[in-house]
Amino acid sequence: MNRLVVVSNRLADPRKASAGGLAVALGEALNSTGGLWFGWSGRIIEGGTAGEGDLHVQQAGRVTLATVDIGRDDHDAYYSVYSNGVLWPVFHYRLDLARFESGAIAGYRRVNQLFARRLQPLLKPGDAIWIHDYHLIPLAAELRAMGCGNPIGFFLHIPLPPPPIFATIPEHDWLMRSLFACDLVGFQSRQDLAHFSAYVVTEAGGRALGDGRFEAFGRTLRAGAFPIGIDVDEFARLAAGREARETFATMREQYARRSLLVGVDRLDYSKGLPQRIKAFRELLVNYPENRDSATLIQIVSPSRESVDAYADILRELEGLCGAVNGDFGSLDWMPVRYIHRTVARKRLPGLYRAARVGLITPLRDGMNLVAKEYVVAQDSDDPGVLVLSRFAGAAEQLHEALLVNPYDIRGSAEAIQQALRMPLAERRARHAALLARIREHDVHRWCGDFLGALAGDGPAAGNA
Ligand code: GDG
């Protein structure tokens, strides 16, 4: 197999277990080809020159890690304003939160050009290039403009909205045209793929040629749904480890008389956190038998704190949790334990396993890996129940979860009640079906399917 070159905004050292399943899977694919992983170094140069940044190259086993510094102004425009202030909210259907500031697009483009300029000299003929996510949509086009003829694939980790929403971005035409510089474009779900297809036909005047092939802007590419998975064996190993078992034992002891519900999310307005707290409150109101019993542990790991909308959601969440605890709590029962901190990865499976219900209710999510981790961490003989938003990409695969509309507070509370009361036989049957599908579509399959399609020997469509 040809050498693989992965490009993403951030890198992880694939040798470290804390890196998580995605980094491990990409690391394996890179390792097997002696590959190159390229991205931002994480370093911001105060007062740096626009469009400039030093390159650092280091070896991690057989994998070469190449990273670039970014100047302060470029970083603000590329990362905070355009990627996370325009693309992230619009792609998650949140036009109300988008900051369409003219000017930021220039910084976004400058950083993509800088990446292309630093990457191009490192490329060899025959390298397969795999670009990840919304920070780097124009990168393939910038590489092509420098004469790069290598196969290029792009995978979008977040949802692709339908054309009328996507077209609110002033530069939507340029973004899509840039994407057509790729040979293969991958999405998380069939719904995202359908939105891409609709855009090509209705906005770009292009054609769906069938068999995952699309023609627009004078080019042809292949596009498909490649639902990302987790590294099931790695996560099962973590679940069997000392830290996870300790966490499980502590939780079970502390909540022996109670039913635990768990939510684990990055702090983000796409994750439906206020709606989740409201649904939990509704449960306590409508089903009083859960008072002094049901306890929600909500882990919110800090994220993108420099972006204003994230500070707002944090304040709203703190207010809602405080009100539930104030209105319903007693001397020895706090209904919501809200923790705004990152929990060690080795402890997560123990927390998941101790919880009778996993509450994963984003308003919109590309996939949502926490849903899959929750299922894998369960005891098959006495598993908990997954309550999952129908608007997470994972819902296309995880039919046996209790699927909810997170905007429907009352309906979500009903589903939580159903989960808490679900008989053992039904829990086991649902869990077995979910686990089998998560295992079948794990992160290695995702990686293999995408790279197979890029090499031209696999279908361009996923098969969730
Ligand atoms: C994007 C897309 C898509 C969370 N809190 C803690 C922690 N986590 C870990 C989870 C999980 C990961 O972070 C989160 O992954 P998600 O998939 O849920 O969400 P995003 O971060 O938004 O990821 C998403 C994904 O890309 C992959 O394509 O599924 O739709 O938005 O692994 O376990 N890990 C630790 N402590 C925490 O407190 N250690």
Image: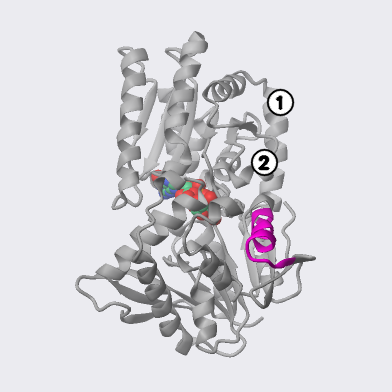
The dot on residue 294 is none
Image: magenta residue range: 193-207
Q: How many marks?
A: 2
What residue does disc 1 label?
426
Closer to the chain start, of discs 1 and 2, is 2
Magenta segment: does it hold 204?
yes
- x%, y% of residue 58? 38, 79
Let me know if residue 226 appears in the view: no
Give the farthest residue toward the top. Answer: 288
What residue does disc 2 label?
398
Would residue 59 appear left or right of 412 to someone viewing this image?
left
Magenta segment: does it hold 302?
no
| Label 1 lies in ligand 1 vicinity (Cβ under 8 Å) | no
> How busy is the neighbourhood of tag 2: few (under 14 within 10 Å), some, or many (20 plus)?
many
- Please tell me which residue is depicted at 54% across the width and 32% down the height of the picture: 406
In the image, residue 107 sits, relative to residue 461, either above or below, namely below
**Could you say which quadrant of the image residue 209 lies in?**
bottom right
Q: What main secondary structure does the magenta stretch of the protein show? A: helix
